[in-house]
Amino acid sequence: MLAFVSSLGGGIVRDLLLGALPPNALRDWRYGTVALSGGALIILGFRLLTRFPEMPLTMMDAAGLALFAVAGADKAMEFRVPPLAAVLLGGITGCGGGVIRDVLLTRVPRILNADLYATAALLGALLTVLLLRAKVNRGWAMALGAAACFALRMTAVVRHWSLPHLSGY
């Protein structure tokens, strides 16, 4: 369940907000199969995973965040929502599944204390939307948006950048 929610929850929320019903993740069996297979691999390889260096895992997570954020923004643009809404829907697509997972686990959502996690997703979505509005080739717009998201996320991790936290929250 957590694998499904973590990987597909943000896209499901985006599709619900766009009125794209039923959401792609529920309509196409391949989405769920990939998510559940990934979860099964994690369960089977958990001991190996705990010995794996943290940085490659962080890089894979940053790459996934980048891909989901720009894909979410692109889909929102296809639905002709206003640019700000498209950026926010890109951020929801990138971060929403992790937030839902953390809530189900009764944890503070990671985006509230991670090094510029949601900010990186919003940057990638914003750049994608701006480039699409400027009529840049869709592939280039998405690639540049994903690269910006990935670069900011990884720079924040390496340099320990974070946004200010409100004390007591």
Image (cartoon, rainbow, N blue to C red):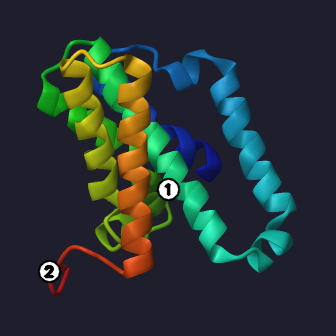
Determine whether 57 is above or below 62 in the image. Answer: below
Q: Is residue 88 left or right of residue 40?
A: left
Q: Which of marks 1 and 2 is in front?
A: 1
Q: Residue at image x 36%, y 81%? A: 160
Return the residue at label 2. Answer: 166
Residue 71 in sight from this viewpoint: no
Q: Residue at image x 46%, y 38%? A: 68
Structural crowding at the residue carrying mark 1, measured as other residues with C-alpha within 10 Å and reported as few (<14), some (14–19) or many (≥20): many
Residue 24 in sight from this viewpoint: yes
Q: Is residue 10 left or right of residue 129?
A: right
- Of all residues, the one furthest to the bottom in this rendering is 167
The picture places residue 56, in percent across and down from the top left corner, at 65, 66
Q: Residue 32 carries which label?
A: none
The picture places residue 95, in percent across and down from the top left corner, at 39, 50
Location of residue 43 (image quadrant): bottom right
Q: What element carries label 2?
A: loop
The residue under label 1 is which amino acid type?
Ala
Location of residue 91 (image quadrant): top left
Structural crowding at the residue carrying mark 2, measured as other residues with C-alpha within 10 Å and reported as few (<14), some (14–19) or many (≥20): few
Q: Residue at image x 35%, y 60%? A: 152
Determine whether 129 is above or below 50 in the image. Answer: above
Which quadrant of the figure contains the C terminus? bottom left
Q: Residue at image x 69%, y 23%? A: 30
Closer to the camera, 131 or 5? 131
How far apart in space, not on screen, are marks 1 and 2 (Cα)?
A: 25 Å
Return the residue at label 1. Answer: 62
Determine whether 85 is above or below 95 in the image. Answer: above
Determine whether 114 is above or below 136 in the image. Answer: below
